[in-house]
Amino acid sequence: MLCKALKRGDLCTASWLEDTFHIMSHINSDSERLCSTLSLLCSYSQNENGIKWFLHHSALNLIPEPVIVKGIKQTKSLKTAIVLLESFHINALKYEWKLKWLTSMLHSAVSMGINAVKNLVSLMGKDLFTKEVVVSVLTGLQDKFGYVEFSKEMIREFDLGSSQVKESSNFLLFNVLAYGNNSTADWIVRSFGVTLEEFITMVSESSHFCSGARVDLGTWKVIVGHFPGLTAYHVRKHMMAMALSSPVTAQFVMDTFPSITKGEFTECAIHEVPTVSDECIDAFKTPNTLGVIFRVSSSSDDNVKRVKPTEVMPITTTWGQFINSLPRDDVAWAIINVRYVTSNGGKRMKQLWLSWIPEGFRRGSTKETVAVKFMTPMVLSSLRLTCAGHNQHGFHHHAGTAEGLNVTDIVERVSRFERDPIDQASVTAFVNGTPSFTS
């Protein structure tokens, strides 16, 4: 009862239990029991005040430092981690920390503001947070925060230089532009001296810009304003999908580059996005499957392009067989039912919605290639809405190689909100086509 009260932060009940039954005296009499109780609270506590109460009533000298570090690693609450770090003055640099945990803690600190970030860094040590982790966390929150000053503070706090920002796998500039955060993008371009060549390379490689997602008029104005050397040739070759984000952006591009005509936009086939057939719904509802692969087919009767299921994979399908079923020369989509079991026996089935554009994918012309890449994520959203509706949870994933479908990374992604560790044996069973459960 005491643990339940502390886990939910009910200090009144905890204090009453202690005053009435002197429970902490019993716990403090046994070092092993004291450590196990702390570990339990760290794993499941919903309120850091419960941890504070427990520590205040505990014989702290009986808790070895490795046990405290283990408790910090177990918690998913930044506030609980801060309480433990401050109470025991742990030298975090002496220990190994999982990248996922560090990223999660920094993510939570960023959501609380720059002071929370500085506090976490001072307690853990700046050296634990790699440049890639910092840029990844900051990038992921640009669409939510959009504060130029916050970006500046983060970059200064972690000593991010031009090379770290540019060379990170999650290039900060690319993402803030893609999310329409134009004030931050403006500052980054000026502060880090991004060149036109670097920008064009980014555009040609970025899935955000291939899809044209969220590239609004303000973004185009930032791009044109900062890269005076940008020409109609660059736009035609790499940026037509961006220009097709809306009629307003298309008109702006035609006004800025008069040699680009409305007919060229039409040739990109933006209005020829395939429709999702009713067959997809039936395939989606098929029970006990690994998932379904969908592709575009044209009807000989009306010459209309439709997305249809091409393969319903039974639950016994291995992960390797699924990857081999994806086309190597054409785009495709898939719904994957990822099954695993948590350490406490919880059965989970998470849906992954896959957009597949194979590496090196090309059509007859650059314009046609861009048009297909542009419509692929749109089809994925339409497919999910048609099959699962508005309220269906799931994860979107984009890949073009077998490496991009690493099952360990995928399971880690779909299970990131789990409180308990994942039973890796269940993941192995899923990969081998023998999942631990079928429902």
Image (cartoon, rainbow, N blue to C red):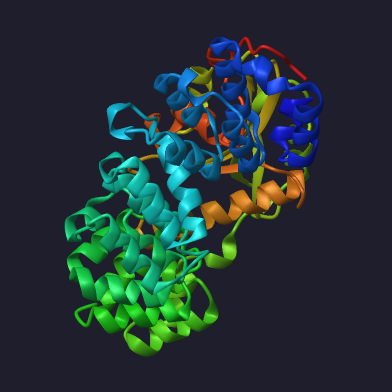
Residue 2, how many percent across, how many down? 75, 27
In which quadrant of the rendered view does residue 343 lie? top right
Task: Note whether residue 30 is visible.
Answer: yes
Going by the image, does 318 lie left or right of 405?
right
Q: How many marks?
A: 0
Residue 275, how many percent across, how many down? 67, 54
Of residue 276 and residue 7, the one placed in the foreground of this image is 7
Q: Is residue 357 above or below residue 58?
A: below
Residue 376, how many percent across, how many down? 52, 52
Instruction: Tell me which residue sits at (58%, 26%) in the image.
Output: 58
Instruction: Tell me which residue sits at (74%, 22%) in the image.
Output: 22
Task: Note whether residue 194 is visible.
Answer: no
Q: Is residue 124 above or below residue 268?
A: above
Instruction: Tell me which residue sits at (33%, 59%) in the image.
Output: 172
State which quarter of the image contains the C terminus. Answer: top right
Instruction: Tell me which residue sits at (74%, 49%) in the image.
Output: 386
Q: Is residue 325 above or below residue 151?
A: above
Going by the image, does 390 lie left or right of 33?
right
Of residue 374 and residue 179, the one placed in the foreground of this image is 179
State which quarter of the image contains the N terminus. Answer: top right
Of residue 100 and residue 285, the one placed in the foreground of this image is 100
Residue 200, how many percent across, how many down? 25, 64
